[in-house]
Image (cartoon, rainbow, N blue to C red):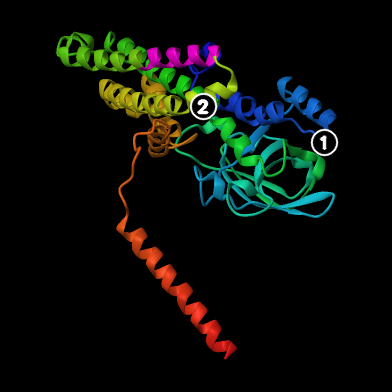
Amino acid sequence: MITFDELSRTSGGVVIALSVGLGIGLTPVITFGMPQDTVKQDNIITEVLAGKTIICLAITEPTGGSDVANIKTTAQDMGDHWIVNGEKKWITNGIFAEYFAVAVRTGRPGPKGIAMLLIERSFGGVETRKMECTGMWPSGTTFITFKNVKVPKTNIIGYEDKGFQQVMYNFNHERWMVSIQAIRLARTCVEESLKFARQRQTFGKFLIEHQVIQHKIGEMARHVESAQNWLENITHQMCTMDKKEQNQKLGGHIALLKLHAGRVMEYCASQTLQVFGGTGYTRTGKGARVERIYREVKAYAIPAGSEEIMLQLATTQFGFVNRKMPDPAQKQIKALQKEVEELKEELKKKAKM
């Protein structure tokens, strides 16, 4: 937590560029391994940890982000290898990466037809294009196209048809990591506001002497300190639970923490821009840091699960709805389905006659 917090002082883009490959790209290789080629597994882990190469996690696609169960990138079984075709979008570090931990569809629709493959750029057929985004410029957000990429069967991460569980297994730590960064950037906004307000003079006195500015900074500090307390509480629980217990008990809480951290960052960035005025709307000078953080807000609200998905996940895990009212539409659908089946049976009987 301390490492991510301190790295986040630089900027969201820098900490994402430095940490995401290690934090979420390499994790599946370490956690689930490559059972059919443990030598390659060890070599990749060593290379990435030594900083000699970069790995990225490729899950999100142009047609869907949080809906992991319905990914469309395919891996066709060719006996001793897979042929991978498809597209991945908004992939952090993708433009820099030599290795890609990729979620692919190897079988039937839904979550049970998903596997994770370790694809190497050297295989050929891997095209990467840097995407121009509002913020997070150093993070290398990438559009990836896989065209008939030949991947050895030995490059499977974990086990076939277990890919969905492997992807979901990593989400709690990713959201926790995002929360740390968002809260630090919110705190940076408070620090920058204080520093600027103590220097800037308006109407014959320092900006900080105006009560309205004091209130703005006080409100920001209130939001940041509450978020920091929640983060440290969750972190303590993560340190005292094993991974299985974390996934069972903390998923909803971490989802809400991630949502809260993003909203605190958004609030502080907006209020800091008001404190800075036109200076905060400029990409150079005293307001450059504030302007950059303001552009990075949505990169914390959307990736790793949007706010709407986080709320739905939390309320589902907390069991808010324990008894559902009957849905009249479902009753009518069942009646129509029964009628269709009866008509089919009647037609079969007539055909036999």
**What's the magenta region?**
227-240
Residue 349 vs residue 117, the one in the foreground: 349
Residue 298: x %, y % from top left: 41, 34
Question: Which residue reaches farthest bottom?
Answer: 353
x and y percent of residue 157 in the render? 72, 36
Q: Residue at x 56, y 35 (%)?
A: 168
- Left or right: residue 133 compared with residue 318: right
Foreground mark, 1 or 2, reads 2
Callout 1, which amino acid?
Answer: Gln
Residue at x-position 30% and y-position 21%? 272
Q: Is residue 14 visible?
A: no
Q: Quadrant of residue 256?
A: top left
Location of the C terminus by quadrant is bottom right
The amino acid marked with disc number 2 is Gln
In the drawing, does residue 108 fall left or right of residue 70?
A: right
Front-most of 189 and 264? 264
Can you identify the residue that label 2 sits on?
248
Q: Earlier in the sequence, mark 1 or mark 2?
A: 1
